[in-house]
Amino acid sequence: MSVDKDRIQGSFEQAKGKAKEVAGKVTGDAKLEAEGKAQKAAGKFQNAVGGLKDVARGQ
């Protein structure tokens, strides 16, 4: 069973986004926090697309 690359990349983007979000909160950098939230959301979407591809392939 191979996992779609979008799921892997999406999970990675979510983790990077969460790190940026936390760093923004800690440093009081609202822009960095917002970028982190956006990156995390994009990662969730990409992960979901990968999940749909997996389902379409019957995995």
Image (spheres, rainbow, N blue to C red):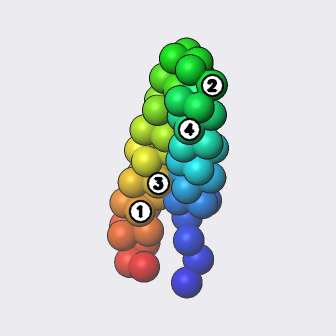
| Mark 4 and mark 1: Cα distance apart in space | 27 Å
> Circle 1 is placed at which residue position?
51
Counting residues from the start of the chain, the first of labels 2 and 1 encountered is: 2
> Circle 2 is placed at which residue position?
27
**In screen coordinates, is 5 left or right of 59?**
right
Label 1 near label 2: C-beta < 8 Å?
no
> Which callout, 4 or 2, points to the residue nearer the camera?
2
| Mark 3 and mark 2: Cα distance apart in space | 29 Å
Counting residues from the start of the chain, the first of labels 4 and 2 encountered is: 4
| Mark 3 and mark 1: Cα distance apart in space | 6 Å
Q: Name which residue type carries label 4.
A: Val
Label 1 near label 3: C-beta < 8 Å?
yes
The residue under the point 53% across, 30% down is 25
| Mark 4 and mark 2: Cα distance apart in space | 9 Å
| Mark 2 and mark 1: Cα distance apart in space | 34 Å
> Circle 3 is placed at which residue position?
47
Label 3 near label 4: C-beta < 8 Å?
no
Nearest to the observer: residue 40 or residue 32:
32
Residue 47 on image: x %, y %: 47, 54
Please rate how many residues cluster around mark 2, counting C-alpha atoms within 10 Å: few if below 14, some from 14 to 19, many from 20: few
Above or below residue 13? Residue 51 is below
Residue 42 on image: x %, y %: 47, 37
Counting residues from the start of the chain, the first of labels 3 and 2 encountered is: 2
Q: Which mark is residue 22?
A: 4
Q: Name which residue type carries label 2.
A: Thr
SS under mark 1: helix
Label 2 near label 4: C-beta < 8 Å?
no
